[in-house]
Amino acid sequence: MAGRARLLSPRAALWAIGLPASFVLGAMVGSFLNVVAYRVPRRLSIAAPRSFCPRCHRQLAWWENVPVVSWLALRGRCRTCRAPISVRYPAVEIATGLVFAGVTAGWRGGFPTPGYFALAATLVVVAVIEWGGIRAPLSVAAVGTGIGAIALGLGVTATGAWGFLGPAAIGLAVGIGAFALLRRWDPDARRPAAFGRSMLLPAAPWLAATGARPAGIGVAAGTAAYLVALAVSHLVARQMPANGGEAGNGAGACSGSGSGDRCGGSACDTCTAGGGSGRTCTVDGGTGPHRALPPLAVGILVAVAAVLLVR
């Protein structure tokens, strides 16, 4: 034989090894994103202590933190106090794993993949926080986007693909500018049309670096999804009872302050001062009417997903 045959072609290796490995990595990252989404709005450290049950505060053993598997093994309940564990946790882990696999497939495992992993993780964690009914801190999007930008820059330096850097930098500048305009228009994020605006920071370079055609398709799809979601949110807000919270804010009114209060019939985990009819709340793991993804976040997620599909 002239040479040894390859065991796997690059395409076969991507599907047989790259995608499953990306899913596992994404699920592990998703487990960390759950920690960030729970602790950052409560101003808790994401480094210490170890993961714990919010009800009995027992620190979890390592095997209770295995993504998805632990939730299934524990049947969705704390081993000690039997408090239910929100399905959000395995859902975020699975979703992040699927997104990482999609990024690997979209970029064929090329040099932009690690940077896009960071941008994807940023989009996921901001969306999870926003789903909880409060605005995600700008620091979450800024740190995640910065990590993604650094990873992309290292990839460009290693491969010499300098043509990639310009569109990504322009996209980042556009994202920062769009965020600044929305913040100037609505400084306190009280208008539903501006909720989820920090997702513009990771989404803009994500779109711009893929090229004009994919970015154009993504922007068109995202804009359509945003308009539909905004119309639906207005219809839902009009049908809410007068005492069901601030119209369009997606948050119920608390009957008190601090942990343990009641919010829309569920126990509040976090209450922060808000304007209008009362206080804005987030209920971790709850299913109240105030839990919804902001229209802008819906549009951004649709846009970035469309780009991966058309590349």
Image (cartoon, rainbow, N blue to C red):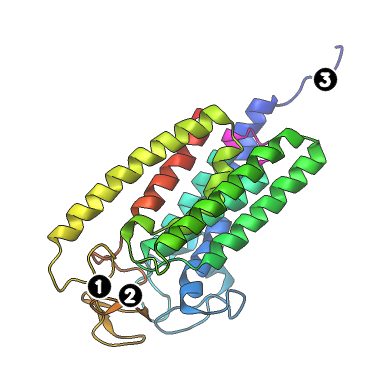
Q: How many residues crowd mark 3 within 10 Å: few (<14), some (14–19), many (20+)?
A: few
Element under label 1?
loop
Q: Which mark is residue 4?
A: 3
Q: Amino acid at mark 3?
A: Arg
Q: Is residue 78 visible?
A: yes
27 to 277, vertically: above or below = above
The residue depicted at 71 percent of the width and 40 percent of the height is 165
Q: Which residue is mark 2?
A: 281
Q: Does the image show residue 66?
A: no
- Picture coordinates of residue 275, whole percent (x, y): 31, 77
Residue pictured at 29% horizontal, 48% vertical = 229
**Please, what is the dominant secondary structure of the magenta stretch?**
loop
Looking at the image, tell me whether mark 3 or mark 1 is earlier in sequence order.
Answer: 3
Q: Nearer the viewer, residue 1 or 246?
A: 246
Q: What residue did someone put label 1 on?
A: 252
Residue 54 lies, in percent from the top left, at 42, 79
Q: Which residues are magenta?
A: 104-112
Q: Toward which corner of the image does residue 255 lie, by quadrant? A: bottom left
Three-letter amino acid code of the residue under disc 1: Gly
User: Does 153 sit left or right of 287 as displayed?
Assistant: right
Q: Are marks 1 and 2 in contact (CB under 8 Å)?
A: yes
Q: In the figure, is residue 271 to the left or right of 125?
A: left
Q: Residue at x 22, y 74 (%)?
A: 264
Q: Residue at x 85, y 16 (%)?
A: 3
The residue under label 2 is which amino acid type? Cys
Is residue 109 part of the magenta span, yes or no?
yes
Q: CA distance from mark 1 to mark 2?
A: 7 Å
Indicate the quadrant containing the C terminus: top left, top right, bottom left or bottom right. Answer: top right
Looking at the picture, does residue 258 appear above or below residue 237? below
Q: Horizontally, is 219 left or right of 261 in the view?
A: right
Furthest-top residue in this view: 1
Task: State the separation of the CA atoms marked 3 and 1.
Answer: 66 Å
